[in-house]
Image (tube, rainbow, N blue to C red):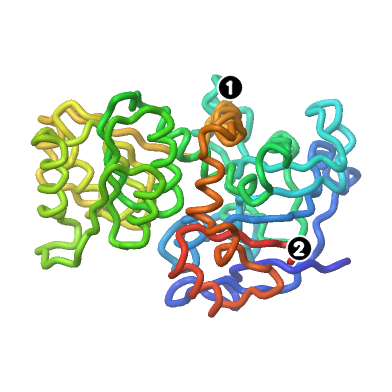
Amino acid sequence: MPQIQALTIDLKNNEWHGQKGFIKREVDMPVLDEKTHAKDASFVIVKVKFAGVCGSDRGMWKREAFTDLLHKSLEKEQKTMRILGHEFVGEIVEVGSLVGDLYGIQKGDTVSGDSHITCGKCYQCRIGEQEVCQDQAIMGISIDGVFAQYVKIPAKNLWVVDLNRVRPEICAMYDPFGNAVQALTRVDIRGARVAVFGCGQIGLFSILLARQFGAAKIIAVDVNTDNVDTALKLGAHAGIVISPSQKEHGYDHDPEVIAQINELTYGKGVDVSMEMAGFNSSINNCIEATRYGGQVILFGIKDGDVVIPKFSKMVVKGLTLHNIIGRQIFKTWQIAQRVLSDKSNGVQDKMWEEIMHGGNGPVIQFSQFSAELMEEKMRMYPKLVFDMEG
């Protein structure tokens, strides 16, 4: 069988606990075999052109996220190796026999696609809440992903893209950009004061969108000065850098940060706090920073338990917590496409110039991958994209 290059974790040779990183190795080329697997009639093979490195990929690199999901899925498949990655754009090179009739997709189309493979049968899927499908798989985590030269994907998950409207490297970010779209459309932020805790890639996307969707004041909070500086370039009105401090517990909120936010909001607190980092202390910062009756968006994910001191205070303040997972398929995608395709709003240009530095640095040639290069790039940039053909 033909071999292709892929980035993987193999629990047999690259154990999880006490390790980090991905291993580049040769794996079997994916194939469509309808005689053996009837479902292949609705699948396609995509030649991956660009693949984005998500915050969850960084978490898996460091073995800080999705431990149980990855292990249990491999055990279920009786495998030890997982191909990573779930953000992509590529060209369809082979289609199953039913794909054209069912989805209007054909060989040669350029596509991105949603990373959550939903069952289509559970209660949530049947009532249009596919983002919380109770039997979903996630590419690159619970099934094989897109950090490979070719990938096999169900055609129902694909979104045909127009490279004349959105450049290919940005098309590879539709999936994480959609996370920000869903987070920013869950509550009404028109005229709101918003604090974004964690200015990594999706936090930065959220700042762009908050400005686009009419927030009155956006406060960017991060431990990284460069990330805060980028947030200000993207439209944040104020930036706060969290400095190391002596706290009794690691989960405690940062009083100095809350004091600065109160000063910026005339003692009220923000209307909406967005937790995009996943750290326990960041969650508690969000709760403390939000005004009475305000909204808290929880998106960041880290393994382990969370402690919320004085939980009753959150109830007394009347806060509403929203947990964001994935995207609304495909409502979120349509909103994202319209925002990115509108050249007059500057969103796509700012993503490319400010977050991606015009491709100079954050775009990595897949052929040049090494653990040392990845470590260096992850330290330098909030968002990375692999050029899979480079």
Question: Relative to 251, does residue 337 appear above or below in the rendering?
Answer: above
The residue that mark 2 highlights is 389
View extreme (front): residue: 344
* 33 left or right of 277 in image: right
Q: Residue at x 27, y 28 (%)?
A: 192
Residue 147, image quadrant = bottom right
Per the image, label 2 sits on a secondary structure element best described as loop
Residue 181, position in %: x, y? 47, 34
Looking at this view, is 353 or 380 the one in front? 353
Q: How many marks?
A: 2
Q: Earlier in the sequence, mark 1 or mark 2?
A: 1
Residue 261, position in %: x, y? 16, 44
Residue type, numbered disc 1: Arg
* 115 left or right of 255 in image: right
The residue that mark 1 highlights is 126
Residue type, numbered disc 2: Glu
